[in-house]
Image: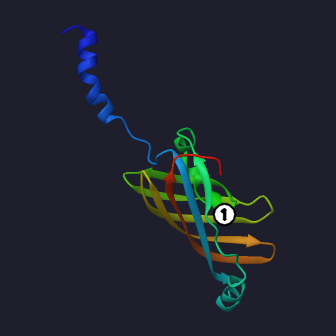
Amino acid sequence: MPLPRRLAAALPLLLAAAPAPPLTPGAWEETVVFALDSVNGSADLAARMGKALPTPQPRQSCLTARDLQNPQGLFLAGAEQSCRFRRFTMADGKIDAAGDCSDGRGQAMHVEGGGSYTPTGYDFTFTGTGQVGKLALIFRGRDSGRRIGVCTAF
């Protein structure tokens, strides 16, 4: 069999074996929820301060195939955080991550977590520690997202 025919015959097998992007490009909605467990070692202070946390608002964005080539940049983005993950795995429907995040106003935190994903959604739960001024925080949270359709103007 000539080479072009062999390639043509093998093409369906190659396409089936090619890794699919973990998430599907399109319009996505993300919600990040935090809960304070301890502030300066006090659960009572955390409970009082937790009442002042804003109600989480879903954030919509248009994610391209290029955006999804490095999906770790998407996690905790709805919390207006910039994160550098020293450990990040997103494979076989599972997410495992650990890294440090900053909001650009001097608030830094360390997060570790895990979760699951499909091409049209993800659910990532995490725990962490942070420092805001003189306040030492211990917290937990959830970052969940779902594809809501094709991209349109938001």
Residue at 60% in and 67% down: 32
* Label 1 secondary element: helix
Q: Is residue 90 above or below residue 10?
A: below
Q: Nearer the viewer, residue 137 or 63?
A: 63
Q: Nearer the viewer, residue 2 or 133?
A: 2
Q: Quadrant of the N terminus?
A: top left
Q: Is residue 69 above or below residue 30?
A: above
Decide: few, some or many residues near mark 1? Use Cα within 10 Å; few <14, some 14-19, many ≥20: some
Q: Nearer the viewer, residue 55 or 153?
A: 153
Residue at 51% in and 65% down: 113
Is residue 41 shown left or right of residue 140? right
Estimate the x, y position of residue 64 in percent, counting from the top left.
56, 41
Residue at 26% in and 10% down: 3
Residue at the far top in the pictured view: 2
Task: Identify the image quadrant of residue 66.
Answer: top right
Q: Which residue is mark 1?
A: 79
What amino acid is at disc 1? Ala
Is residue 33 shown left or right of residue 24? right
Estimate the x, y position of residue 48 in percent, counting from the top left.
71, 89
